[in-house]
Amino acid sequence: MLNQLWLVPTLPLLGFLILALCGSRWSRGLVATVGCGSIGLSALVATAAGFDLLTTNSENASFTQHLWNWFEVGGLSLSIGLHLDALSLLMILVVTWVAFFIHIYASEYMAKEGYSRFFAYLNLFVCAMLVLVLADNLLMLLLGWEGVGLCSYLLIGFWYSDPANGAAARKAFVVTRVGDTALMVGILLLFKHLGTLDIGQILSTANAQWQPGSTIAITAAALLLGGAVGKSSQLPLQTWLPDAMAGPTPVSALVHAATMVTAGVYLIARMHGIFLLAPVVMGVVAVLGATTMLVAGCSALVQSDLKRVLAYSTISQIGYMFLALGVGAWTAAMFHFMTHAFFKALLFLGAGAVIHSLNDQKDMFKMGGLRKKLPAVFWTFLIGSASLAALPLVTSGFYSKELILWSAWASPHGHPTLWAAGIVGAFITALYTTRAVILTFFGKVKTEVSHQPGARMVLPLCILAALSTVAGLLQTPHSLGHLHAFSDLLETALPVTHLNGSSSVEITLQAVAVAIVLAGVALAYWLYQKAPHLPERIASGWGKPIRKAWLAGWGFDWIYDQLLVKPIVAVAQLNRRDIIDLFYTGLASFARLLNFLLSASQTGRMRWYAAGISAGTIFIFLIVYFT
Amino acid sequence: MSAVPINHVLILAAILFSVGLTGVLARRNIIFMLVSVEVMLNAAGLAFVAAGARWQQADGQVMFLFILTMASAEVAVGLALILHLHWRRLSLDSDTLNKMKG
Amino acid sequence: MINLFYIAALVAIIATVLAITRHHAVHALLYLIVSLLAVALVFFTLGAPFVAALEVIIYAGAILVLFLFVMMMLNLGQDAKEQEREWQPLRIWIGPALLSCILLALIIHAIMGEGSASVVTEEVGPKAVGSLLFGPYMIAAELGAFLLMAGVVGASHLRRREFQSEITGKEES
């Protein structure tokens, strides 16, 4: 199946083309079949290809498929090629399967107009994401990168008739563009110095040519980090993701939780060689990740919109991944990416089911008591929340988060401060997750359920819930049997992380983490279930300014508004009459004036023309004769 | 053979030309404008023939032949246009035919 | 011979002035014929009998007769004459006449400045003209033929469309 690898991105593209060309005339069933079928087939091909890859050569598991030459110019020969190794295999499996489940979910969820348009966009998104992941050179990666950005824009603004949605889409596009620009500059820099765009060659030549810690390596890594930060919604470009929740919920689940926002994580993991040459940037990645995790976690604590809680939670969890990347724990980051893709997609889909059942009610304070009304959604949501909060032993989130925390402590790049930040983050995560669950599913019924989700919505929830539970068992810590299937797989593509620390320390740290998480859950339970008046009193009392700041995402939007948007708008206002162009418009209006005069002379009367000719003759005669 | 001063011939041509020009400028009826144009062409031809006679060359007469050719073609098309206008009950007044107004 | 030239010139000028000032088109054309015949006489005095003959045959004979035929087809009567009188009040002549006089004065001034040379009126016969026309001027002659063809095609095209719309009674847009 390896030689059919090209089918993996092509099938969704085909689905997109078919739906875009004739989807609007088809029935909903047919559209859903094509939309889900293309992704499903792609997932099957990806699985088969992965199986072949792992069975045929397990030593150095990578496979490059050269499809054709893209272009050749000035000694640069660029190919359209697909590169499959353990890292991209993990990505395509997660992307295709999660996308498949979400497509099935969406086939019931999407009820309003634009059914085929939605599936067309979604298929295009999956195609672009797969191109991004499978690209064997940076330019093709950029193609996919911009493709997912475009689809993100289209899908956030899917219900374009509401101007707010359009504004959110624009914001997402423009803010990520800042990062994209950095990435593009980084790619050009790499090309200028290394003379190639092929990722494998870049990594090997950079390793051979550049000194660790050299300026050029730091610059290149920092620029790549800029791209990753924009796409993955990390500080300081994290402001777009909460607003991106304006899109349909399946989009939030697929694009803004499971796949696209983790493209930055993938980019850093893919370009790990460059980052290893720039230890400073690695430190920046870790600190950025830790800071983002805490900042976004705090914001998630006070949100009332269920989807916004999850959005801030996504930012926070990607912060964890960045933390792991920053300390050189590549495998841990990818492990958390995988588990996060499962449980966050699950949570978003569950939230979508709740919102759908309550007729688009997104405010958690107007929900409540849904435990009995929506049992299937409740149980799956609970499993997802447990995984997000990293409840010990039974959830996948626990294992991936433990690995990150342990790496933050024990890796040569790690530091106890980073571990401490991770622990605080875990506490906050447990707190807001439990808060969301209690507010939504416990307590009194505040809004009646209008209809139950159907099988096509519940089934993906169940599958994702199962995955959220068992996926963690691929990799367990030393204290719990030390399974290491996942790291064995990924370490064929990514460097091995050497963790130095005794198992007694590890167990102690784990105990601390578990205690912290349980304390967080207990605190939230006490605050929102036993003493619900207390948070309100805090929020209206001394906590008011803090709540306000956290609710607005620490005021980043306000700062950017003051620092960037307002000045630019002011300059634009100043220049609305095109001061610089005044000279050129003046030329144009002068020409218009002449045109006016000349066209006034065109009376259409022949005799005047003849008179004009005679007068001209006389004039020329005078000139010739008397000079 | 007695000789005619070349100046006088050319002045005759100039006078005829000016009269034709006056006609073109003054008459509003297209038919008369066409007649006046013929006068002007003829005057130009006269100048050519005079010049040819002055230097005893046949070139001037050849040029007159070309003017003649041109005049007949012009008259053919011009008269066809006049008939066209007339049959469509349009005025022959050149001042009302101002569709080319800019 | 000189006297013949001056008489012919006088006739030509008077006939031309009359031709462009008549209100009746047929009268104007008849005066124009007179003018052309006078010019033909001038050509003859200049020693160009071939051109003089062409002037009579083609200009006065063919072109002006074509004009007359068209006038007949237009069938302009007394009304046209009245209208012409209405269109041409005397003051309309002032401007054009002024312009022409300035031009004429300039030209005459230029011509007189060149000094006077007499034309030696030796005949340049049709043979010389013919050998020149079909020698060095061959291409120009061919182009003249093209021009005539274009005139024929253009005229017939205009008439044909006209004829069709006459038959069907439909006005063209």
Image: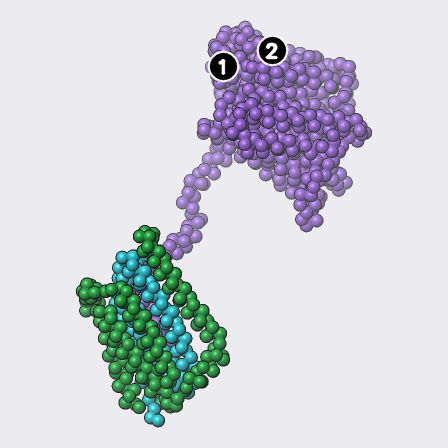
In the foreground, A137 or A547: A137
In the picture, residue A189 is in which quadrant? top right
Q: Amino acid at mark 2?
A: Trp
Locate residue C158 relative to residue A35 in the image: left or right.
left
User: Disc 1 and disc 2: Cα gap in Å?
Assistant: 18 Å
Mark 2 belongs to which subunit? A
**Chain that is coloured purple in the picture:** A
Q: Which mark is residue A358?
A: 1
Q: Colour of chain C?
A: green
Label pair 1/2, CB-CB below 8 angstroms: no
Q: Residue at x 29, y 59 (%)?
A: B87
The residue where tag 2 is placed is A379
Q: Colour of chain B?
A: cyan
In the picture, residue A136 is in which quadrant? top right
Residue A464: image location, x then y, percent: 64, 18
Q: Which mark is residue A217?
A: none
Is residue A498 in sight in this rendering? no
Is the residue marked by circle 1 packed among few (<14), some (14-19), or many (20+) residues within 10 Å?
A: some
Locate residue C97 relative to residue A293 in the image: left or right.
left
Mark 1 or mark 2: whose residue is earlier in sequence: 1
Q: Residue at x 49, y 27 (%)?
A: A159
Q: Amino acid at mark 1?
A: Leu
Position of residue C100 relative to residue A117, above or below, is below
